[in-house]
Amino acid sequence: MAASAQPGACIQVRLFASLREATGWSVQLVTPATTARTPLALWQQLELGPGEPPAGVRVAINQQFASWDAPLADGDELAFLPPISGG
């Protein structure tokens, strides 16, 4: 999963809050599988949960909210943000 290939060929994946706690990591450089060029495909490649992501989990690409089917490019930063409660 984690990769040390040429820097531009990887996508930096960041997890926040409960996702970080559940997986035990917060940042990984990932070389996407040939078909894993969307946040949803990368979620599945990293096996972050069974099937579809939980309701309320948001995606950001390069610090901008995006859709689960947005295309990813080499060198992008992808963040998965779970719902945060509190007040």
Image (tube, rainbow, N blue to C red):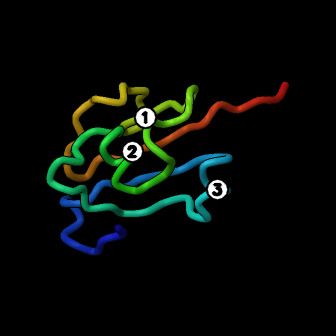
Residue marked by disc 1:
60
> How far, Cα to Cα, is label 3 from label 2?
18 Å
In the rendered structure, are the residues bearing label 1 and label 2 in contact, judged by CB atoms less than 8 Å apart? Answer: yes
Label 2 sits on a secondary structure element that is strand
What amino acid is at disc 3? Ala
Question: Residue 22 — which label?
Answer: 3
Q: N-terminal of the two: label 1 or label 3?
A: 3
**Residue 73 placement: quadrant:** top left
Q: Is residue 1 above or below residue 61?
A: below
Badge 1: how crowded within 10 Å, few (<14), some, or many (20+)?
some
In the rendered structure, the answer to whether residue 38 lies left or right of residue 84 reads: left
Q: Residue type at mark 1: give it.
A: Ala
User: Residue 17: percent from the left, percent from the top?
Assistant: 66, 46
- Sequence-first disc among 3 and 2: 3
Q: Which residue is mark 2?
A: 78
| Image quadrant containing the N terminus | bottom left
Q: Nearer the viewer, residue 14 or 23?
A: 23
